[in-house]
Each structure stands twice: as structure tokens, then as C-alpha cells.
Image (spheres, rainbow, N blue to C red):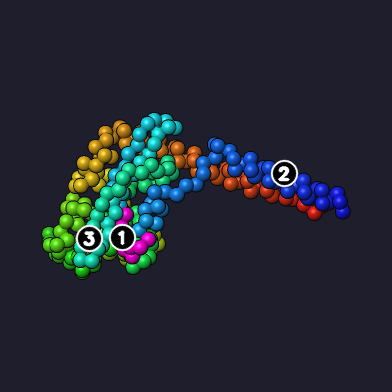
Amino acid sequence: MLKKIMTAALGFAIVAVTLNACGSRSDVPRWEKSPIDNIVKSLSDKPDFSIILYDMDAEGSGSSTVYKHQYKIVVPEGDTVTARETQWYTVSDVFFDQNVNNMGMEIVTKKDGQLKKQVSPAGYNHYVGNEKYGRWTERNGGSFWEFYGKYAFMSSMFNMMAYPARRSYYDDYYGGGYYRSGRPYYGPGGQVYGTKSYTSSGTGKNSTWGNKPSSFKNTVRSRVSRSATNTKTRRSASRSSRSSSYRSRSGGFGK
């Protein structure tokens, strides 16, 4: 009996040492909250808001590269709508890689108290299709969203001067299963909205990212893709190692 107790105790000690050693490894990336999580928390008293990826940048080179985001926060306030750009935030390589195609897009919205983390065209979740702010009008053989005069500034805010909101796109977003499933929506064929279109004309053209040469953007895209893949691989390996270590050490208990 004493031998069994000593064996079990030794097993627990080995497991504790193994787990502590894994947890203290400096080369294993730790999960961290994104700036978006903190912004959402700061807006917890607001029943409605939108967070748009307004700009992005990268500084440094190689493994020392620092990835950065800037957001636009849009909040309806009574009979008007306020918008402000945030400071620049440092983000992880994984989060930057996940959103590298999402400039000018809403990446988080809250409507009637319900939070939704989905990539969608700016304005689609709150304002386009909402008769409080505008209406659908027919022109040039198609149906387009037009804001009322007091909200006309929102067309520029959402880059709709360059890429008008077509009724067919709106119907595709809501009726095509994108909104319901949470899948990103970049327009028909995935070519209308997102970083490339946002920075090619309209308000996004003069952004920090928009003003960077193509060679810089391509280098950053390639670099962050590799970095994010390596980070996720190390995290996965760390979780697998911890799980395997626990199972192997715990297997001798009770013998």
C-alpha cells in the first residue's frame, strides 16, 4: 500500500514539474487578447457600434517586425452618428495575417446588444437597408443605397463614393448565407470589397498602407504569413506536448 502511495505521489510530482517546465518556456507563444477585445470591452455600455479596420502598417524586419492596426469606431448617437479613428495598436502576427485583406471592412459589430465578429462591407450591418438613414434608389439600370442628406457624410465614411452599395450585393450578403453563417463577404466573386479595392480609390487610397509601394506590401504579406504559420504550429505543438506528457505520466497511477 505504501509503495502505491509513493508511486502515485512521485507521478504527480513529475507531472507538475513537466507542466511547469512547458509553461515557462520562452519560445512558446502565449495567447493574448487583441486590441479589438479591449475596444469592445470599453464600449460595453453601447448597444450598437461598428469597428472598421481603418489602416495597417508594419515596422522593422525579419523576426523583429512589429505589426500595427488602426481602427475606426462608428457609434449611432440619437439622431446622428459619430465616428473616430483610434490610436495605432500593436497586434500579433496571427491577427494581422487574419485581417490582411480586410481594410475598410467591418470586423466587429454590435446591434441591439448582440455582438458579431464577422468581416463584412462597412455599413452593411447597421445602416445600409435601414430606412432611418436612407433608401434604395434606381439609377443606371440598377438599385443603389442612398443616404438621406443629414447622413450623406456616411457615404464617404464607408467608402461608398468609390464603391456604391448595390442592392444585388446587399441581397447576396443577407440572402446568400454569409450573414447567417458568419463567413466573410467581399462581394460577388470576392473582388469588390477589402484591402485591395479600399486602397485603390476613395478614402483608403491615402492611408498609410495605401501609400506603401507594392513591393513593401508583398514582402509584409509573405513575411507575416510565414510568421503566423510558425506561431500557430508552435502553439499546437505546445498543447500536444502538454497533453501527451500528462497522459503518459498519469498512466502509472494506481498500479
| Quarter-of-image position of residue 26 | top right
Mark 2 residue type: Ile
Q: Which residue is mark 2?
A: 14
- Residue 18: give x, y in percent of width and height: 67, 42
Q: Main secondary structure of the magenta part?
A: loop
Secondary structure found at label 2: helix
Element type at mark 3? strand
- Give the distance between the C-alpha atoms of the residues marked 1 and 2, in whole angstroms: 50 Å
Tell which of 93 and 33 is nearer to you. Answer: 33
Q: Residue at x 28, y 51 (%)?
A: 72
- Residue type at mark 1? Phe
In the picture, the disc for residue 127 is none
| Mark 2, other Cα within 10 Å: few <14 / some 14–19 / many ≥20 | some
Point 58% across, 38% down: residue: 25
Q: Specify the segment rendered in magenta.
A: 44-51
178 or 103, which is in the foreground? 103
- Callout 1 secondary element: strand
Using the rendered image of the protein, determine whether residue 105 is visible from the camera's viewpoint: no
Residue that badge 1 annotates: 49
Q: Is residue 119 magenta?
A: no
Q: Is residue 48 magenta?
A: yes
